[in-house]
Image: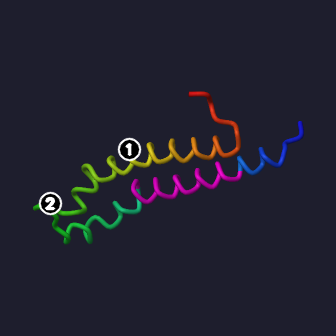
Amino acid sequence: MATSENDQAHWKKTTNLMWIMIGLWIFFGYIIHMFVNVLNKIVILGFPLGFYMAAQGSLIAFVVMLFVFAKKQDQIDREFGVAEDD
């Protein structure tokens, strides 16, 4: 099965978006927690930043990333004419 240049360009943009989201997921899921002791020295509204990121910050980042990913993927799909009908 041959793929067209449009399909290849669509897949390339989709793959790039996926790698960016995986990088952000690793950052908020693992990297930021490795520096919790350093982040705890920063206090915002009475809460140490490391504690806040472990308790809520990472979860909020994941939810925001989900919506950003869906919006960007929809833009890519529309750009290449493979979007689902609304």
Is residue 25 or residue 81 the one in the foreground? Answer: 81
| Amino acid on which disc 1 is placed | Val
Find the distance from the CA under tag 1 to the CA under tag 2.
21 Å
Circle nearer the N terminus (1, 2): 2
Q: Please, is residue 80 above or below residue 38 in the view?
A: above
Q: Residue at x 26, y 68 (%)?
A: 39
Q: Residue at x 69, y 36 (%)?
A: 82
In the rendered image, which residue does mark 1 sit on?
63
- Magenta span main SS: helix
Where in the figure is residue 26, as x and y percent of width and height?
46, 56
The residue most toward the top is 86
Residue 64 placement, left or right of 38: right
Tell me if residue 14 is in the magenta stretch. yes
Tell me if residue 48 is in the magenta stretch. no
| Amino acid on which disc 2 is placed | Phe
Q: Residue at x 52, y 53 (%)?
A: 21
In the rendered image, which residue does mark 2 sit on?
47
Q: Which residues are magenta?
A: 12-29
In which quarter of the view is residue 7 placed? Answer: top right
Is residue 7 or residue 47 the one in the foreground? Answer: 7
Where in the figure is residue 83, as x and y percent of width and height?
64, 35
